[in-house]
Image (cartoon, coloured by chain):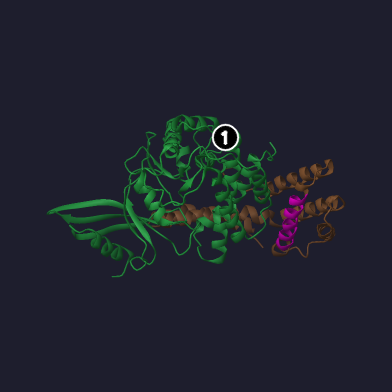
Amino acid sequence: MKPDSARLLDVFAVHLMTKVAPALPQAYQQGDVSVLGIMLLAVKEETERAASRRIEENAALRRLFETATPRVQDARLRERLAEAASSADPGLTISELECANIALRDLLIDLHAHVEELDSPEARRLDQDIWHELAQSTERRRLSMGAF
Amino acid sequence: MDTLEARLCDYIAGKLRHGSGVRVENLDRIFGGASRETYRFVLHWKEDEADHSRRLILRRDPPSSLIETERAIEFAAYRAFHGSAVPVPEALWLEEDPQYLEHPFFVMEELSGFEASPQAITQPPYSDHAAKLAQQKWRILGEIAKADPSKLGLEGIMKSVAPGECWQRELARWEGVLDEDELCPQPVIRAAIRWLRRNPPPPAQKISVVHADYRTGNFLYDAEGTIHGILDWEMAHLGDPLEDLAWSINPVWRWARDERCGGLAPREDAIRIWEQSCGLRADPDALRWWEVFSSVKGQGIWVSGAQEFSEGTNQDVILGLSSWIMGNAQDRAALLALGRLPS
């Protein structure tokens, strides 16, 4: 479909911020509509990467779990990790990818807490890998308009 | 007419024993702040055969808010600091009975003609006075830290806490908010919480009033670089004064998009001004604990807003924006404080 959704959101955002907001009588309404415009720009940025960042992250988490599985001492956690490592995204819609992502990130929390209790060079390496993935996951979600 | 203006007018008329001809005019909602609905208005009345008018602020609880806060404590904090070295507006009436305006509220003086925007402070003419504003910002925070809660009359109003228990109480509170409100896993913040429990800070040097949202955006300033009022005391409590210092230098408030805390001053300058003002020491390890904690608390606030927005209990557009942008920035701030953010 044309115009692209990104183009539509861009135009709508500018329209709200430069045409609609200044024409409103009250400062509260102006602020409200201006934030709607800013939010549309954020939605545009997120929409563009919504599928790719989840596919990338879900794959990274499965690789991490595959590496971690033989190093984990808890049998039940090892089983969950092995199962997650061999799983696949159920589909390519955002809601399907998000559902898988939530389950994988829940498991990441359990794995991280477990690894922190272990005292071995292997566990420390795994801990480093997890922190690396946490930093990556934060970058994947970063929005350009953020102050930090 | 049963407008908010009319109901507010009736309420105030009942409070002004010696006044008559009470009128409320120009009631106008102020944008921003999702924990209270804030309105400015002008009150007119006659007293001793003379006409009077005063610019006032109405702070009313919304149906649901970003964080569940105690309006009586906020009101008491304004009253306690009024006329002190900590500039605040005069608080006039607190009403917790919802029969008047549907929700509890309080009325206070409007400090008018000043700016509060965290973005404006990074632009001329305000940015020309960044150093002066920074000096006042952290000096006033030092005054809050230095103040004696019992002399302020706040000890019976705010829950008491022992110096060694401040961190546990605050961490339990915000972990509880995350447990209750998070809509998706928070692996960075959960790791931060475990780190905080493994590395407890030393006991507080003293029990202070903690403003708890002391940052650029919550004070009024002018174009000559003078701060005129510290606002938004809705999360105020007794605790470790380092909690406020850490919150004030959290990287998520770097509005100038550079290293300056709150868009005003480098971290070390902010800490030095605060130490000189209150006479306390910001022990680096203890301060680091509170910096990590401040990102847990911040994420608690953003997650709570996201939950309110998603549930439909509060769909203020600012909640949608803060959930996305501030939520991500808060994870980055946590990683930075933990030494895990790649340079």
Up the image or down, A48 lies above or below B210; here it is below
Would residue A52 be seen by someone viewing this image from the given angle? Answer: no
Residue nearer the viewer, A70 or A118:
A118
Image spot of residue A72 (x, y percent): 83, 52
Where residue A98 appears, as percent x and y from the top left, is 70, 61
Q: Residues within 10 Å of mark 1 (few under 14, many from 20)?
A: some
Q: Disc 1 sits on a residue from what chain? A: B
Q: Residue furthest bottom?
A: B1
Note the chain letter of the green one. B
Q: Relative to residue B199, is residue A73 drawn left or right?
A: right
Q: Is residue A28 left or right of residue B188?
A: left
Residue A49 location in percent, x, y? 69, 54
The chain coloured brown carries which letter?
A
Res. B247 visible in picture? yes
Q: Please tell me whether mark 1 sits on a helix, a strand or a loop.
A: loop
Residue extending farthest left: B49
Which residue position is annotated with label 1? B259
Whether the magenta-drawn stretch holds residue A108 is answered as yes
For the residue pair B85 and A16, the one nearer the viewer reads as: B85
Q: Amino acid at mark 1?
A: Glu
User: In which quadrant will I find the C terminus of chain A?
Assistant: top right
Residue at the extreme right: A70
Q: Quadrant of the N terminus of chain A?
A: bottom right
User: Closer to the camera, A117 or A7?
Assistant: A117
Q: Quick check: B192 left or right of B205?
A: right
Q: What predominant SS class does the magenta segment belong to?
A: helix
The stretch of residues the image draws in magenta is A98-114
Q: Is residue A130 magenta?
A: no
Residue B230 in the image, given as x and y percentages of width and height: 40, 43
